Image (spheres, rainbow, N blue to C red):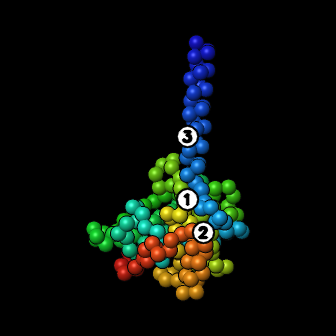
Amino acid sequence: MKQKTWKIGLAVGVAAAAAAVVLNSCVTIPKGARAVRPFDQQRYLGTWYEVARMDFKFERNLSDVSASYSLNNDGTIRVDNKGYNYVQQKWKESIGKAKPVRDAGTGRLKVSFFGPFYAGYNVIAIDPDYRYALVAGNNLNYLWLLSREKSMPAATQTAYLKQAQALGYDVSKLVWTKHEHSN
């Protein structure tokens, strides 16, 4: 009986380790990209407005997109994403959590909106005043230009687009977010 219990325990342990590898492997950074370091997580908290994004199913048909980041009691970051679905004519909100991939001093976070499944959120450029940011996802399908205001200076936007292009992003596919509604 002890041998059978040991084998079951070993099988559960191997399955758990494999699941951990699979889940953590989803938290990557595009080839050639470097996360901001030093990164001040406290200064990053607050509200960011989406200026542009690579479109994907969870943000399709959204305008007025913003994300608010605040600290949870357990040290993780609460992520409150909001956007106006202009097709359905209603607000959409999604609450998630984020935490550093390795250390809080690097702009690499893992974000989850669906239980134990995390995705990469990599701050690859930020201005010294933490007003404008370029964020890459796991791969070249995810990219965001963010601002503390609903727009971004042309020079900053151009610099971020050049940086994204140098990494292989097709910036012609960006969706430029309109901000027309109040919530």
Looking at the image, residue 183 lies above or below residue 158? above
Q: Foreground: 89 or 11?
A: 11
Label 2 – label 3 distance at C-alpha: 30 Å
Left/right of residue 172 with respect to residue 182 in the rendered view: right
Percent from the top left, x then y, of residue 175? 43, 74
Pick out the residue farthest to the bottom.
154
Residue 120: quarter of image: bottom right
Q: Tell me if label 2 and label 1 are in contact, CB under 8 Å.
A: no
The alpha-carbon separation of the residues under discs 3 and 1 comes to 18 Å
Instruction: Give the residue drawn at x 50%, y 71%.
Output: 170
What is the number of the mark on residue 39? none
Residue 67 can be seen in this image: yes
Image quadrant in which you'd find residue 10: top right
Q: Please tell me how crowded label 1 is: few (under 14), some (14-19), or many (20+) other residues with Cα within 10 Å.
A: some
Residue at numbered disc 2? 167
Q: Find residue 111 and report its image quarter.
A: bottom right
In the image, what residue occupies the spot 40% across and 75% down?
A: 64
